């Protein structure tokens, strides 16, 4: 089994553990144990550094999965950073086949954090330079704040 940070976080979320991501402070904790602290980590992140367009495409895909994921109603499924569709607005197919929201939330938040701390997303990218945020054209509720990219 891979022991990179992204995989460890996903396994923890799938097993019901608390995974907390702070995009402002660049921190990731599993059950209170810091794996990424203010942008510093040990070992492998599990995400290679890519160009900003590729990074944003990866986040858009993870966001699409989160947006249509199935709520768990246990407090682990709500993201303070990203919007998800309410259970009453999901289709029957999405409810039957969708990923569990705590896992989808974890993947989206940890992926976003990893792409920030590995330098894939920066304030200097052409899509962010001089702006407060980037907004997805595919998913208008998906926003990446410039303040998250400050290192």
Image (cartoon, helix red, strand yellow):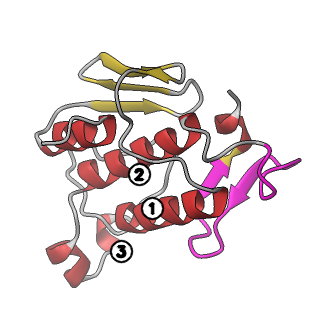
Q: Which residue: 25% across, 57% down?
A: 71
Of the two numbered discs 1 and 3 in the rendering, the one whose residue sits closer to the viewer? 1
Q: Position of residue 92 (x, y in %)?
A: 21, 82
Image quadrant containing the C terminus: top right
Q: Position of residue 74 (x, y in %)?
A: 20, 42
In the rendered structure, the answer to whether residue 54 lies left or right of residue 133 reads: left
Q: Position of residue 55 (x, y in %)?
A: 56, 57
Q: Label 2 to label 1, Cα distance in Å?
A: 6 Å
- Residue 142 in view in this figure: no
Q: Tell me the chief SS of the magenta region.
A: loop
Q: Which residue: 24% across, 44% down?
A: 10
Give the number of callouts. 3
Q: Which residues are magenta?
A: 124-144
**In terms of secondary structure, where does tag 2 sit?**
helix
In the rendered structure, the answer to whether residue 53 lies left or right of residue 34 reads: right
Q: Which residue is mark 1?
A: 63
**In terms of secondary structure, where does tag 1 sit?**
helix
Image disc number at residue 108? 2
**In terms of secondary structure, where does tag 3 sit?**
helix
Q: Nearer the viewer, residue 111 or 94?
A: 111
- Residue 72 in view in this figure: yes
Q: Which residue: 77% across, 51% down?
A: 125
Q: Position of residue 38 (x, y in %)?
A: 53, 19
Q: Which residue is mark 3?
A: 89
Q: Is residue 8 magenta?
A: no
């Amino acid at each position: 089994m891979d022991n990179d940070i992204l995989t460890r976080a996903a396994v923890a979320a799938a097993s019901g553990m608390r995974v907390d991501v702070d995009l402002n402070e660049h921190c990731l904790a599993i059950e209170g144990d810091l794996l990424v602290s203010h942008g510093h980590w040990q070992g492998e992140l599990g995400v290679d550094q890519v160009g900003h367009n590729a990074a944003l495409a990866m986040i858009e895909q993870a966001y699409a999965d989160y947006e249509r994921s199935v709520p768990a109603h246990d407090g682990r499924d709500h993201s303070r950073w990203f919007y998800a569709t309410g259970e009453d607005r999901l289709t029957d197919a999405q409810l039957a086949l969708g990923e569990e929201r705590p896992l989808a939330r974890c993947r989206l938040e940890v992926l976003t954090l990893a792409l920030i701390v590995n330098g894939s997303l920066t304030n200097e990218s052409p899509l962010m330079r001089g702006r407060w945020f980037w907004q997805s054209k595919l998913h208008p509720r998906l926003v990446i704040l410039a303040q998250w990219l400050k290192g």
